[in-house]
Image: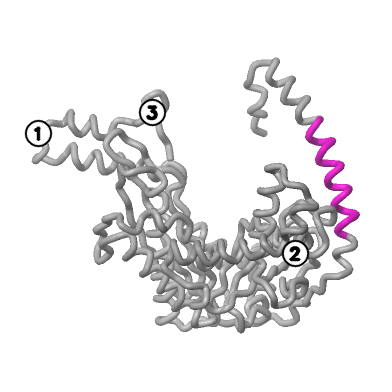
Amino acid sequence: MEENPLLTLPRPIIEALFKCADYEAIRAKKKILKLENKLKQLGQKLRFQKIKGNRGGVISAVDGSMSPRSSSRIGCDFGIYTAGYMVFEGRDLKDEKYYAGSLSWNEGRLSFKTLLRLLMAYAERKAALETYWSHNPDFIILDGPFFYFRGFCRYVKAVRIGIGRIKTGLDLIKRTRDMTLLLMKTKKAVCVIRRSVIRAIDGWILYNYGEDYCFRTRDKHILTTLMPPNSIWDYSDLFGDEHNPLLYATFYRFYRKWRQAGESAENLSRRKEELMEQSIRDWEKKFKKDLNLELSELPRLKRYYIRYSSSAPPFEVEVVEGTDVEAFAEHFVDFHNPTTGLPLPMDLIDSAVRLPRGATTAFTEEIEARLVRDPDIKNKTAISDYFTYLNPQKREFV
């Protein structure tokens, strides 16, 4: 067993942190017991649909990976990304294909991360459409929501990229957006959201009943407690079809923002319609500014939770309305990972494309080595200066 890393710290710090652990354990105990009592009431209202069948077929799983941080050198930042797909017929691997690319940048960290994420999403969408056209699968599993790449796109539209046919940031945004819309039209794409953090249930409770009735926790936590194995839960079961769960989650975020700034619960309750309108405008503005896309151009989206095992949490999925989520769920009754609770093809493609720790640093050092061997560069000190670590006190390993 590995030694507790806390024990390597100075003794006064160890003792202080252990006291903090006692305090936090007491706080967590109170929260857990209070939440448990409140959840019993909600559990009586929710209807969980049993996954009845167990079907086979052709499934495609698509995923990508990118540098968690750039390799930061004095002259430039470097990042890499991967993408790929696996096609399964029943439990047998029928086909697989992989892509990889890189980005060098020295114009700011925010634009670098936004562009790298966009390039990865572009490769993922390209892989997904390729598997759709070549294999016509029953379903295509995508990692994350349809438009997970949207954030901060407005700030890179005029950036000159020059990678293949992609000339500008706007060109990259439009290509990735349009391929995503094309996948949505197939009604075969199912987005699996592994790290869901939204609080749409609390947003709905807040809007309809007030702050005192909220659970103050993530939807995934609530449903991990309440969902039985081999079941599906539809957000519409609680919300009806009036609003997308993301709008209630946004409403909750705006409410908490004003509440933490000092607004009273009574005043915010009177302003709830205004806050809901603000939530709708916020989504409309973000899609228009980041993706040049009107919300009216999007097909209607729905979200569900699926659970296979009591020993693993449920997972959230996003689909276009009309997608047969029940049929999707039936494909993985005996073809899921019991440890993660996810469809096994999802875990397999994730493992195949995931960048190992240190991969970005190794890639950057490979670039430097090639330049050192290049006879056209006489001044090797210039290469050393360009590739010197931005933080010389600590060897980088990303």
Q: Which residue is mark 2?
A: 204
Asked whether residue 88 is in view, the answer is no
Q: Secondary structure at mark 1?
A: loop
- The 10 Å Cα crowd at callout 2, few under 14, some 14 to 19, many 20 or more, is many
Quadrant location of residue 194? bottom right
**For marks 2 and 3 on the same chain, the one whose residue lies earlier in the sequence:** 2
**Amino acid tagged 3:** Asn
The stretch of residues the image draws in magenta is: 23-39
Per the model, the C-alpha gap separating discs 3 and 1 is 26 Å
Residue highlighted by disc 3: 391
The answer to which image quadrant residue 84 occupies is bottom left
Q: Is residue 146 left or right of residue 235?
A: left
| Residue at x 11%, y 37% (from the top left corner) | 377
Give the residue type that dot 1 points to.
Answer: Lys
Left or right: where 326 falls relative to 386: right
Nearer to us: label 3 or label 1: 3
| Image: 327 above or below 11 | below
To which residue does mark 1 refer? 378
Amino acid type, label 2: Trp
**Neighbour tally class for label 1: few under 14, some 14-19, many 20 plus, Cα within 10 Å:** few
Q: Main secondary structure of the magenta part?
A: helix
Q: Does dot 2 land on a helix, a strand or a loop?
A: helix
Q: SS class of the residue under badge 3?
A: loop
What percent of the width, then of the height, locates residue 199?
A: 70, 58
Residue 57: x, y in percent?
Answer: 57, 82
